[in-house]
Image: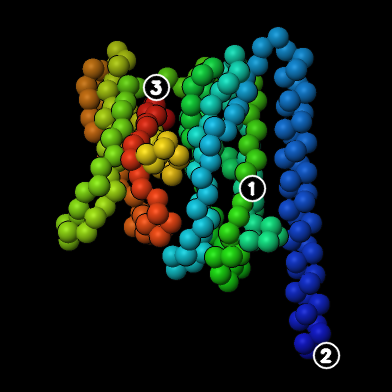
């Protein structure tokens, strides 16, 4: 009888998880449809397009799913991030878990501007990498009257370096210049890392808290890639080659 009850609870939990996934997906699709229909009535509108996305499933003390995406405003008006949903699926396409996305870097894009999406999700119920092997990403934007975030001049360089113990480490150096007429503080520094074919490998970001950059001055911001992510790339035969950056006052 106890075995039967445990079996029944397991089946019931799986059913409830599928229902939650279906409802979330339905809401995301309805929102996307409403935004699309709303845009068709305007003479001009922003359009949030996912140029490419990269999903990485890995185990590091726990099972983690990472999603990285390069997005672009392919419309002719400013676009603001509305919402997003990351669904983590098993190798068989069954839902395992999901997570809402609330932020794009930066959150408003002018026509032709690119931005990035980053999200990591710990999946406590996973028992193996097969439980988080696949994903589905849904993003929506909305036309905005807000001004696009002003960007500082920046460039990013990737290099394979060594750490203090002589181990290899992946380093991204972002050089940013304050091309405004006043000191700026708390800049958000974002990069996308690509392989030799231009395929997106990962995205990361940080805030230069309490750092003021006088007008016309240049600083460098240094990132290192997480060792577990780098090890996953090696296992998959992936090799970073170049980086792009976005820097803006937060």
Q: CA distance from mark 1 to mark 3?
A: 30 Å
Q: Nearer the viewer, residue 246 or 214?
A: 246
Label 2 vs 3, first from the N-terminus = 2
| Image point (59%, 65%), residue name | 130
Q: CA distance from mark 1 to mark 2?
A: 38 Å
Instruction: Count residues near mark 2 (Cα–Cα under 10 Å), then give few for <14, some for 14-19, many for 20+.
Output: few
| Image point (76%, 41%), residue name | 27
Question: For residue 248, which quarter of the picture?
Answer: top left
Mark nearest the camera among 1 and 3 is: 1
**Residue 28 visible to the viewer:** yes
Horizontal and vertical percent position of residue 36: 73, 25
Q: Nearer the viewer, residue 112 or 187?
A: 112
Residue that numbered label 1 is attached to: 136
Residue 31 to residue 201: above or below? above
Residue that numbered label 3 is attached to: 151
Q: CA distance from mark 2 to mark 3?
A: 64 Å
Q: Nearer the viewer, residue 49 or 151?
A: 49
Q: Nearer the viewer, residue 55 or 79?
A: 55
Q: In the rendered view, does 192 fall on the left or right side of 212?
A: right
Label 1 vs 3, first from the N-terminus = 1
Horizontal and vertical percent position of residue 63: 51, 64
Instruction: Count residues near mark 3 (Cα–Cα under 10 Å), then give few for <14, some for 14-19, many for 20+.
Output: some
Q: In the rendered view, does 84 fall on the left or right side of 51?
A: right
Question: For residue 229, which quarter of the picture?
Answer: bottom left
Contact between labelled residues 2 and 1, with CB atoms less than 8 Å apart: no
| Image point (59%, 43%), residue name | 101
Q: How are the colours assigned in the image?
A: rainbow
Tell me the SS state at disc 3: loop
Residue that numbered label 2 is attached to: 1
Tell me the SS state at disc 1: strand
């Amino acid at each position: 009888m106890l075995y039967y009850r445990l079996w029944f609870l397991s089946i019931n939990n799986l059913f409830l998880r599928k229902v939650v996934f279906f409802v979330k997906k339905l809401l995301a699709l309805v929102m996307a449809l409403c935004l699309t229909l709303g845009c068709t009535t305007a003479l001009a509108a922003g359009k949030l397009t996912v140029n490419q996305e990269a999903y990485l499933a890995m185990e590091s003390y726990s099972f983690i799913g990472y999603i990285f995406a390069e997005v672009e405003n392919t419309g002719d008006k400013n676009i603001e991030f509305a919402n997003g949903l990351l669904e983590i699926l098993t190798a068989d396409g069954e839902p395992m878990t999901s997570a809402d996305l609330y932020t794009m870097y930066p959150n408003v894009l002018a026509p032709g501007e690119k931005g990035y999406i980053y999200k990591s999700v710990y999946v406590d119920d996973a028992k193996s990498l097969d439980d988080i092997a696949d994903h589905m990403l849904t993003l929506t934007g909305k036309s905005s009257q807000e001004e696009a975030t002003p960007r500082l001049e920046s460039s990013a360089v990737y290099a394979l370096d060594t750490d203090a113990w002589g181990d290899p480490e992946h380093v991204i150096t972002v050089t940013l210049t304050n091309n405004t007429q006043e000191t700026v503080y708390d800049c958000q520094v974002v990069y996308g890392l690509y392989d030799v074919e231009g395929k997106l490998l990962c995205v990361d970001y940080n805030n230069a808290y309490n750092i003021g950059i006088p007008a016309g001055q240049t600083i460098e911001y240094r990132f290192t890639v997480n060792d577990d992510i780098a090890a996953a790339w090696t296992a998959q035969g992936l090799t970073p080659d170049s980086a792009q950056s976005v820097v803006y006052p937060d």
